[in-house]
Image (cartoon, rainbow, N blue to C red):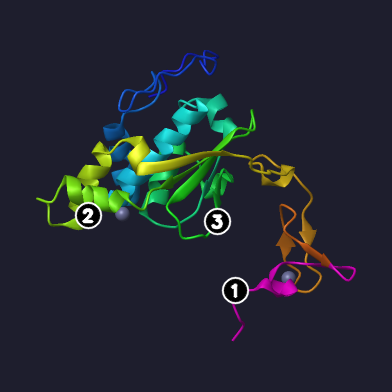
Amino acid sequence: MACAGEGSNSSGVKLKAARGVLTAFMKSLDEYLLDAEQAHGHLCAGQVLGVRLAMLGLIKLGIEDPRGNKEDRKRLVTFVEIDRCATDAVAVVTGCRLGKRALKFRDWGKVAATFVDVNSGKAIRIAAKESAKTLARQMHPEIADKNQQQMLAYREITDDDLFTTQWVKVELPPEEFPGYRGERVVCEACGEGINFRREVRTTGKVLCRACAGESYYQPI
Ligand SMILES: [Zn+2]
Ligand SMILES: [Zn+2]
């Protein structure tokens, strides 16, 4: 896998990324799908969609090997908008993980993700088209099982028919970066430590978000 010669990252090279024919360092769709299947536990239409979506994001940003190449890895932050199968696949392809702070979750219930090149500031948001399901049905009416039908069709449909893409700007303050080292404060109400500037300062008090009223749980 790590065939990247030290320091020979070709980020300046214009990428010829015809569909299915990828860059020297990037894996193929089939290879990523194998990885995704292992990580996710099964192969499903969502995995195919997620792998395709993430590959397109990397190609658009010219980031070839975020899992193997150290420089590429540090360049990428990914926002995902749903906690479903496709998200696992996005994490597999990009190498961005919640625990590394390189995967950001915005719970919007959409099969969409935004890929941010933190070096250049370039960012692209890619969303699955609503029409893809209908297209899959038209392409493979012979397959009754929806998941099987979509799994096959999502391999074949062109990027343009499968996704909408949009260049965007993403505000990433320092505390959002994976390597951020900031002060840790203690909530004045519950005494728990808070990292990454997630504290709320109101009426002269430093509170965690739960104590400030955003709690998702209630003590019983
Ligand atoms: Zn799945
Ligand atoms: Zn608290």
SS for dot 2: helix
Magenta part of the chain: 202-220
Q: Residues within 10 Å of mark 2 (few under 14, many from 20)?
A: some
Q: Which residue has dot 3 on it?
A: 106
Labels 1 and 3 touching (C-beta < 8 A): no
Q: Determine whether, in the image, residue 46 is placed left or right of residue 78.
A: left
Residue 147 — which label?
A: 2
Q: Nearer the viewer, mark 2 or mark 1?
A: 2
User: Which quadrant of the structure image shows residue 171?
Assistant: top right
Quadrant assignment for the N terminus: top left
Ligand 1 quadrant in view = bottom left
SS for dot 1: loop
Q: Which residue has dot 1 on it?
A: 216
Residue at image coords 71%, 67%: 209
Q: Determine whether, in the image, residue 177 is placed left or right of residue 38.
A: right
Of callouts 2 and 1, which one flags the residue occurring earlier in the amino acid sequence?
2
Q: Pinpoint residue 12: horizontal percent, then vertical percent.
A: 54, 15
Mark 1, ligand 2, within 8 Å: the answer is: no
